[in-house]
Image (spheres, rainbow, N blue to C red):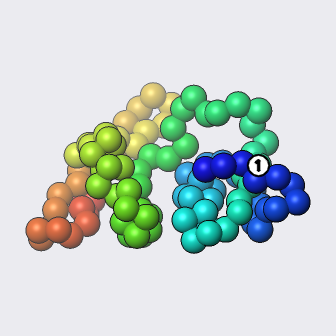
Amino acid sequence: MPRPSRKTVDVLVAGAGPSGLVLALWLARQGGKVRIVDKAAEPGTTSRALAVQARTLEFYRQLGIADEVARRGLKFAGVNFGFAARRRRACRWARSAKGSAPSPTC
């Protein structure tokens, strides 16, 4: 995405996290001139999200990137929740019908 000058920006996106980046991508694909600002001086080195929500995948599909995101993403069958190094609850995901979103069993 070309970096527009200060005088030509249509939209200023505050925050370069997953939501801000997808918003900027969407606006740019619609012809908007976008500038992204973030308080961090450099790119993040850790994940900012545990999972991609179904609604986010719907937006990704409209942008044509859903399949690639899913292909590159880590897939897991469950998660453990804990506190003070002790596991409190384990949840596993299972599909209830072909193509439906996984539902947790905790």
Q: Residue at x 38, y 56 (%)?
A: 65
Q: Residue at x 55, y 52 (%)?
A: 18
Query: Residue 98: x, y in percent?
Result: 11, 68
Quadrant containing the C terminus in the rendered view: bottom left
Q: For residue 57, what is the image quadrant?
A: bottom left
**Is residue 13 visible in this depiction of the protein?**
no
> Going by the picture, which residue comes out furthest to the right?
7
Q: Quarter-wise, where is residue 29 in the image?
A: bottom right
Q: Toward the viewer: 9 or 105?
A: 9
* SS category of the residue bearing label 1: strand
Q: Nearer the viewer, residue 28 or 91?
A: 28
- In the image, farthest residue toward the left: 98
User: Which residue type carries mark 1?
Assistant: Val
Crowdedness near tag 1: few (<14), some (14–19) or many (≥20) residues, C-alpha within 10 Å: few
Q: Position of residue 55 (x, y in %)?
A: 42, 69
Confirm whether residue 102 shows in the render.
Answer: yes
For the residue pair 43 and 89, the one nearer the viewer reads as 43
Q: Which residue is mark 1?
A: 37
